Protein backbone atom coordinates (compact mmCIF):
# COMPACT_ATOMS: atom_id res chain seq x y z
CA UNK A 1 0.00 0.00 0.00
CA UNK A 2 1.28 3.46 -0.92
CA UNK A 3 2.52 5.44 2.08
CA UNK A 4 0.37 8.38 3.13
CA UNK A 5 1.64 11.88 2.36
CA UNK A 6 0.92 13.09 5.87
CA UNK A 7 1.92 16.69 5.27
CA UNK A 8 -0.46 16.98 2.33
CA UNK A 9 -3.21 15.18 4.29
CA UNK A 10 -2.91 17.61 7.20
CA UNK A 11 -2.44 20.65 4.95
CA UNK A 12 1.19 21.59 5.65
CA UNK A 13 4.56 21.25 3.91
CA UNK A 14 6.47 19.03 6.35
CA UNK A 15 5.44 15.88 8.28
CA UNK A 16 6.25 17.51 11.63
CA UNK A 17 3.91 18.48 14.47
CA UNK A 18 5.16 20.82 17.17
CA UNK A 19 4.03 19.17 20.40
CA UNK A 20 1.59 21.23 22.48
CA UNK A 21 3.37 22.21 25.70
CA UNK A 22 1.23 24.01 28.27
CA UNK A 23 3.17 26.40 30.46
CA UNK A 24 6.09 26.93 28.08
CA UNK A 25 4.44 28.13 24.88
CA UNK A 26 1.47 29.82 23.29
CA UNK A 27 0.39 30.69 19.76
CA UNK A 28 3.70 32.49 19.09
CA UNK A 29 5.56 29.18 18.82
CA UNK A 30 2.72 27.55 16.87
CA UNK A 31 2.78 30.41 14.34
CA UNK A 32 6.54 30.16 13.89
CA UNK A 33 6.47 26.40 13.28
CA UNK A 34 3.49 26.75 10.95
CA UNK A 35 5.21 29.41 8.87
CA UNK A 36 8.27 27.14 8.66
CA UNK A 37 6.18 24.35 7.13
CA UNK A 38 5.23 22.20 10.11
CA UNK A 39 1.99 22.00 12.08
CA UNK A 40 1.92 24.40 15.01
CA UNK A 41 0.02 23.36 18.12
CA UNK A 42 -1.71 25.49 20.75
CA UNK A 43 -2.03 23.89 24.22
CA UNK A 44 -5.52 24.58 25.57
CA UNK A 45 -5.73 22.29 28.60
CA UNK A 46 -5.11 25.13 31.08
CA UNK A 47 -7.18 27.77 29.24
CA UNK A 48 -10.81 28.74 29.67
CA UNK A 49 -13.05 29.37 26.65
CA UNK A 50 -12.02 33.02 26.42
CA UNK A 51 -8.35 32.09 26.54
CA UNK A 52 -8.72 29.54 23.75
CA UNK A 53 -10.50 32.09 21.54
CA UNK A 54 -7.75 34.65 22.13
CA UNK A 55 -5.10 32.15 21.05
CA UNK A 56 -7.05 31.20 17.92
CA UNK A 57 -7.48 34.85 16.99
CA UNK A 58 -3.78 35.57 17.50
CA UNK A 59 -2.85 32.66 15.26
CA UNK A 60 -5.32 33.52 12.52
CA UNK A 61 -4.30 37.18 12.56
CA UNK A 62 -0.67 36.24 11.95
CA UNK A 63 -0.89 33.18 9.69
CA UNK A 64 -3.14 31.44 7.18
CA UNK A 65 -1.57 28.05 7.94
CA UNK A 66 -3.47 25.17 9.61
CA UNK A 67 -3.10 24.81 13.37
CA UNK A 68 -3.76 22.19 16.01
CA UNK A 69 -5.75 22.86 19.20
CA UNK A 70 -4.86 20.43 21.96
CA UNK A 71 -7.17 19.55 24.85
CA UNK A 72 -7.19 17.18 27.81
CA UNK A 73 -10.14 14.78 28.08
CA UNK A 74 -9.46 13.21 31.47
CA UNK A 75 -12.18 11.95 33.77
CA UNK A 76 -13.36 14.56 36.27
CA UNK A 77 -13.35 13.70 39.96
CA UNK A 78 -14.58 15.76 42.92
CA UNK A 79 -12.16 17.35 45.35
CA UNK A 80 -11.18 14.69 47.93
CA UNK A 81 -10.71 16.50 51.24
CA UNK A 82 -9.35 13.44 53.04
CA UNK A 83 -6.78 12.73 50.31
CA UNK A 84 -5.61 16.34 50.44
CA UNK A 85 -5.37 16.21 54.23
CA UNK A 86 -2.88 13.35 53.87
CA UNK A 87 -1.01 15.14 51.08
CA UNK A 88 -0.77 18.36 53.05
CA UNK A 89 0.64 16.47 56.01
CA UNK A 90 3.32 15.16 53.66
CA UNK A 91 4.07 18.70 52.54
CA UNK A 92 3.97 20.27 56.00
CA UNK A 93 7.74 20.89 56.29
CA UNK A 94 7.66 22.84 53.02
CA UNK A 95 4.56 24.82 54.02
CA UNK A 96 6.38 25.82 57.21
CA UNK A 97 9.54 26.69 55.29
CA UNK A 98 7.65 29.08 53.03
CA UNK A 99 5.00 30.25 55.56
CA UNK A 100 2.10 28.94 53.47
CA UNK A 101 -1.34 28.97 55.11
CA UNK A 102 -3.20 25.76 54.20
CA UNK A 103 -6.56 27.48 54.76
CA UNK A 104 -5.92 29.65 51.72
CA UNK A 105 -5.26 26.81 49.28
CA UNK A 106 -8.78 26.30 47.88
CA UNK A 107 -10.16 23.25 46.09
CA UNK A 108 -10.33 24.13 42.39
CA UNK A 109 -8.85 22.02 39.60
CA UNK A 110 -6.23 23.75 37.46
CA UNK A 111 -7.03 21.81 34.28
CA UNK A 112 -10.51 21.05 32.96
CA UNK A 113 -11.40 18.44 30.34
CA UNK A 114 -12.76 19.36 26.92
CA UNK A 115 -16.44 20.28 27.24
CA UNK A 116 -19.48 21.48 25.33
CA UNK A 117 -18.76 24.96 26.72
CA UNK A 118 -15.38 24.96 24.97
CA UNK A 119 -16.93 23.43 21.85
CA UNK A 120 -19.54 26.20 21.77
CA UNK A 121 -16.79 28.81 21.93
CA UNK A 122 -14.56 27.44 19.17
CA UNK A 123 -17.15 26.05 16.76
CA UNK A 124 -17.37 29.29 14.78
CA UNK A 125 -13.65 29.00 14.00
CA UNK A 126 -13.89 25.38 12.80
CA UNK A 127 -10.30 24.59 13.84
CA UNK A 128 -8.75 22.30 11.22
CA UNK A 129 -7.00 19.91 13.61
CA UNK A 130 -7.94 19.05 17.17
CA UNK A 131 -5.83 16.72 19.29
CA UNK A 132 -6.55 15.12 22.64
CA UNK A 133 -4.56 13.78 25.56
CA UNK A 134 -5.88 10.98 27.82
CA UNK A 135 -8.11 9.33 25.20
CA UNK A 136 -11.05 10.94 23.41
CA UNK A 137 -13.99 13.04 24.59
CA UNK A 138 -17.40 11.39 24.92
CA UNK A 139 -19.16 10.55 21.67
CA UNK A 140 -21.43 13.62 21.34
CA UNK A 141 -18.47 15.95 21.78
CA UNK A 142 -16.32 13.99 19.34
CA UNK A 143 -19.16 14.06 16.82
CA UNK A 144 -19.36 17.85 17.11
CA UNK A 145 -15.63 18.28 16.50
CA UNK A 146 -15.65 16.00 13.47
CA UNK A 147 -18.77 17.75 12.23
CA UNK A 148 -16.71 20.92 11.69
CA UNK A 149 -14.48 18.94 9.36
CA UNK A 150 -11.63 18.81 11.88
CA UNK A 151 -9.13 15.98 11.80
CA UNK A 152 -8.90 14.37 15.27
CA UNK A 153 -5.58 13.16 16.70
CA UNK A 154 -4.95 11.53 20.06
CA UNK A 155 -2.05 10.02 21.98
CA UNK A 156 -1.53 6.31 22.64
CA UNK A 157 1.09 4.95 25.02
CA UNK A 158 0.36 1.26 24.38
CA UNK A 159 -0.73 -0.88 21.44
CA UNK A 160 -4.12 -1.40 23.15
CA UNK A 161 -4.66 2.34 23.40
CA UNK A 162 -3.80 2.81 19.72
CA UNK A 163 -6.33 0.16 18.65
CA UNK A 164 -8.94 1.71 20.97
CA UNK A 165 -8.41 5.12 19.39
CA UNK A 166 -8.86 3.68 15.91
CA UNK A 167 -12.04 1.89 16.98
CA UNK A 168 -13.48 4.98 18.66
CA UNK A 169 -13.15 7.66 16.03
CA UNK A 170 -9.61 9.08 15.95
CA UNK A 171 -8.29 10.06 12.51
CA UNK A 172 -4.62 9.63 13.46
CA UNK A 173 -2.69 8.24 16.41
CA UNK A 174 0.27 9.87 18.17
CA UNK A 175 2.50 7.08 19.47
CA UNK A 176 3.95 8.48 22.70
CA UNK A 177 7.05 6.62 23.83
CA UNK A 178 8.35 6.55 27.38
CA UNK A 179 11.04 9.12 26.49
CA UNK A 180 8.52 11.92 25.92
CA UNK A 181 8.50 14.96 28.16
CA UNK A 182 5.42 16.21 29.99
CA UNK A 183 2.32 14.19 30.81
CA UNK A 184 1.93 10.60 29.73
CA UNK A 185 -1.20 10.20 27.61
CA UNK A 186 -2.13 6.95 29.39
CA UNK A 187 -5.87 6.27 29.55
CA UNK A 188 -6.44 2.50 29.47
CA UNK A 189 -3.75 1.68 32.02
CA UNK A 190 -2.12 3.18 35.09
CA UNK A 191 0.84 0.81 34.98
CA UNK A 192 4.14 2.46 34.17
CA UNK A 193 5.49 -1.02 33.42
CA UNK A 194 3.29 -0.99 30.30
CA UNK A 195 5.13 2.02 28.86
CA UNK A 196 7.63 1.37 26.06
CA UNK A 197 10.26 3.32 24.11
CA UNK A 198 9.01 5.07 20.99
CA UNK A 199 11.04 3.03 18.53
CA UNK A 200 9.78 -0.21 20.11
CA UNK A 201 6.11 0.76 20.25
CA UNK A 202 6.00 2.57 16.91
CA UNK A 203 6.37 -0.39 14.50
CA UNK A 204 3.89 -2.44 16.56
CA UNK A 205 1.26 0.28 16.21
CA UNK A 206 2.05 0.95 12.55
CA UNK A 207 1.52 -2.74 11.76
CA UNK A 208 -1.68 -3.04 13.80
CA UNK A 209 -3.78 -0.06 12.73
CA UNK A 210 -4.78 1.54 9.43
CA UNK A 211 -4.66 5.16 10.60
CA UNK A 212 -1.80 7.62 10.12
CA UNK A 213 0.79 7.22 12.88
CA UNK A 214 2.85 10.03 14.44
CA UNK A 215 5.98 9.23 16.47
CA UNK A 216 6.46 11.24 19.68
CA UNK A 217 9.11 10.91 22.38
CA UNK A 218 12.87 10.90 21.93
CA UNK A 219 12.68 12.52 18.49
CA UNK A 220 15.07 15.43 18.86
CA UNK A 221 17.33 15.47 15.79
CA UNK A 222 17.37 14.63 12.08
CA UNK A 223 18.70 11.10 12.59
CA UNK A 224 15.86 10.23 14.99
CA UNK A 225 13.30 11.75 12.60
CA UNK A 226 14.60 9.51 9.82
CA UNK A 227 14.58 6.48 12.10
CA UNK A 228 10.97 7.08 13.09
CA UNK A 229 9.86 7.47 9.48
CA UNK A 230 11.72 4.29 8.55
CA UNK A 231 9.93 2.36 11.32
CA UNK A 232 6.49 3.23 10.00
CA UNK A 233 5.72 6.74 11.21
CA UNK A 234 3.88 9.01 8.79
CA UNK A 235 5.06 12.04 10.77
CA UNK A 236 6.85 13.04 13.96
CA UNK A 237 5.77 15.17 16.90
CA UNK A 238 8.55 17.15 18.57
CA UNK A 239 8.40 19.12 21.80
CA UNK A 240 11.58 19.19 23.88
CA UNK A 241 13.75 20.37 20.97
CA UNK A 242 11.77 23.63 20.95
CA UNK A 243 12.05 24.41 24.68
CA UNK A 244 14.97 26.81 24.31
CA UNK A 245 13.87 28.40 21.05
CA UNK A 246 13.24 32.13 20.72
CA UNK A 247 9.46 31.78 20.43
CA UNK A 248 8.97 29.52 23.47
CA UNK A 249 7.84 31.12 26.74
CA UNK A 250 9.97 28.72 28.81
CA UNK A 251 10.88 30.43 32.09
CA UNK A 252 14.43 31.49 32.92
CA UNK A 253 14.63 28.84 35.67
CA UNK A 254 13.46 26.14 33.25
CA UNK A 255 15.90 27.32 30.58
CA UNK A 256 18.75 27.28 33.07
CA UNK A 257 17.91 23.73 34.12
CA UNK A 258 17.84 22.55 30.50
CA UNK A 259 21.33 23.95 29.96
CA UNK A 260 22.74 22.48 33.18
CA UNK A 261 24.08 19.08 34.18
CA UNK A 262 20.73 18.43 35.89
CA UNK A 263 19.09 18.05 32.48
CA UNK A 264 20.77 14.68 32.05
CA UNK A 265 18.51 13.20 34.73
CA UNK A 266 14.80 13.08 33.97
CA UNK A 267 12.11 10.94 35.55
CA UNK A 268 8.38 10.37 35.58
CA UNK A 269 6.64 12.05 38.50
CA UNK A 270 3.10 12.58 39.76
CA UNK A 271 3.89 15.09 42.52
CA UNK A 272 3.10 18.20 40.47
CA UNK A 273 -0.27 17.26 38.98
CA UNK A 274 -1.29 13.77 40.12
CA UNK A 275 -0.50 12.05 36.80
CA UNK A 276 2.83 10.68 35.57
CA UNK A 277 4.79 13.29 33.63
CA UNK A 278 8.46 13.43 32.65
CA UNK A 279 10.66 16.26 33.82
CA UNK A 280 14.15 17.11 35.04
CA UNK A 281 14.58 15.79 38.58
CA UNK A 282 14.46 18.67 41.05
CA UNK A 283 14.10 19.24 44.79
CA UNK A 284 10.45 18.27 45.14
CA UNK A 285 10.88 15.07 43.14
CA UNK A 286 13.94 14.08 45.18
CA UNK A 287 12.35 14.88 48.55
CA UNK A 288 8.90 13.38 47.90
CA UNK A 289 9.88 10.48 45.63
CA UNK A 290 9.11 10.92 41.96
CA UNK A 291 6.01 8.72 42.15
CA UNK A 292 4.22 9.36 45.45
CA UNK A 293 1.07 7.35 46.25
CA UNK A 294 -0.18 10.11 48.55
CA UNK A 295 -0.47 12.64 45.73
CA UNK A 296 -4.11 13.58 44.92
CA UNK A 297 -5.63 12.56 41.59
CA UNK A 298 -5.04 14.67 38.49
CA UNK A 299 -5.11 17.62 38.37
CA UNK A 300 -5.69 18.39 42.07
CA UNK A 301 -2.10 17.86 43.25
CA UNK A 302 -1.28 21.25 41.75
CA UNK A 303 -3.41 22.98 44.41
CA UNK A 304 -0.66 22.51 46.96
CA UNK A 305 2.29 22.64 44.60
CA UNK A 306 1.31 25.95 43.00
CA UNK A 307 1.91 28.14 46.09
CA UNK A 308 5.11 26.24 46.89
CA UNK A 309 6.33 26.85 43.36
CA UNK A 310 5.56 30.56 43.56
CA UNK A 311 7.33 30.91 46.91
CA UNK A 312 10.43 29.00 45.81
CA UNK A 313 10.66 30.86 42.51
CA UNK A 314 10.71 34.17 44.39
CA UNK A 315 13.96 32.92 45.90
CA UNK A 316 15.25 31.92 42.47
CA UNK A 317 14.81 28.19 43.13
CA UNK A 318 13.22 25.58 40.84
CA UNK A 319 12.56 23.00 43.59
CA UNK A 320 8.79 23.08 43.03
CA UNK A 321 8.77 24.03 39.35
CA UNK A 322 7.73 21.27 36.92
CA UNK A 323 10.73 21.23 34.59
CA UNK A 324 9.06 19.19 31.86
CA UNK A 325 11.53 17.67 29.44
CA UNK A 326 11.98 14.57 27.36
CA UNK A 327 14.90 12.23 27.96
CA UNK A 328 16.70 13.41 24.82
CA UNK A 329 17.22 17.05 25.74
CA UNK A 330 20.86 17.44 24.75
CA UNK A 331 19.86 18.76 21.31
CA UNK A 332 17.92 21.77 22.62
CA UNK A 333 19.12 24.88 20.82
CA UNK A 334 18.78 28.60 21.51
CA UNK A 335 17.65 29.33 18.01
CA UNK A 336 14.53 30.24 16.07
CA UNK A 337 11.70 27.73 15.80
CA UNK A 338 11.99 27.96 12.02
CA UNK A 339 15.67 27.01 12.08
CA UNK A 340 14.98 24.07 14.42
CA UNK A 341 12.12 22.88 12.20
CA UNK A 342 14.25 23.00 9.06
CA UNK A 343 17.16 21.24 10.77
CA UNK A 344 14.94 18.44 12.06
CA UNK A 345 13.44 17.84 8.63
CA UNK A 346 16.65 18.35 6.64
CA UNK A 347 15.35 21.21 4.50
Image (cartoon, rainbow, N blue to C red):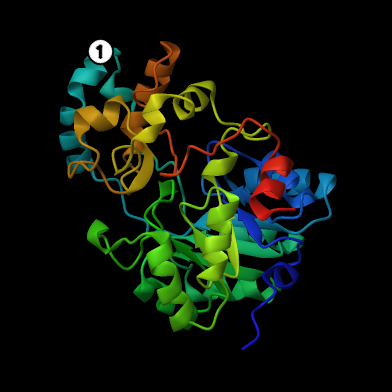
Residue 151 vertical position relative to residue 33 in the rendered view, above or below? below
Describe residue 246's horizontal placement relative to residue 253 as left or right: right
* Residue sitting at the far front: 223
Q: Which residue is mark 1?
A: 97
Instruction: Tell me the element at label 1.
Output: helix
Viewer-closest of 292 and 230: 230
Label 1 Cα neighbours within 10 Å, binned few <14 / some 14-19 / many ≥20? few
Vertically, is 296 above or below 198?
Answer: above
Residue 172 horizontal/vertical position (percent): 56, 72
x and y percent of residue 147 in the render?
67, 76
Determine the residue positioned at 61% across, 89% down: 1
Q: Residue at x 64, y 74 (%)?
A: 146
Q: From this viewpoint, is residue 106 visible?
A: no
Residue ID at (25%, 44%): 296
Between 176 and 148, the residue placed more toward the observer is: 176
Residue 135 drawn at (x, y percent): 44, 66
Identify whether 256 is placed above or below 236. Answer: above
Q: Is residue 277 visible?
A: yes
Front in this rendered view, residue 96 or 4: 4
Q: Position of residue 238 (x, y in %)?
A: 56, 51
How many marks do you count on the picture?
Answer: 1
Left or right: residue 32 versus residue 293 is right
Q: Residue at x 44, y 24 (%)?
A: 260
Query: Toward which corner of the image does residue 245 lie, by quadrant?
Result: top right
Q: Is residue 247 left or right of residue 242?
A: right
- Which quadrant holds residue 333? top right
Amino acid sequence: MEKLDFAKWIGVELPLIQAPMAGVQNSKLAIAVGEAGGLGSIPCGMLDAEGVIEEIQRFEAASNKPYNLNFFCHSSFPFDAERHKVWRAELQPFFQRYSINEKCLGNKASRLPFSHEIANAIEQYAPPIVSFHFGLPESSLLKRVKGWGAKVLSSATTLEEAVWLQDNGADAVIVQGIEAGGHRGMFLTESLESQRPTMELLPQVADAIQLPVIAAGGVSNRVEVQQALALGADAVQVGTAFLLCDEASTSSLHRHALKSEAAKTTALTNVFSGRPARGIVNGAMAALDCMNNKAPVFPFASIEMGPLRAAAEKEGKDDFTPLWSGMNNSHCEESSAAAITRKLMGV
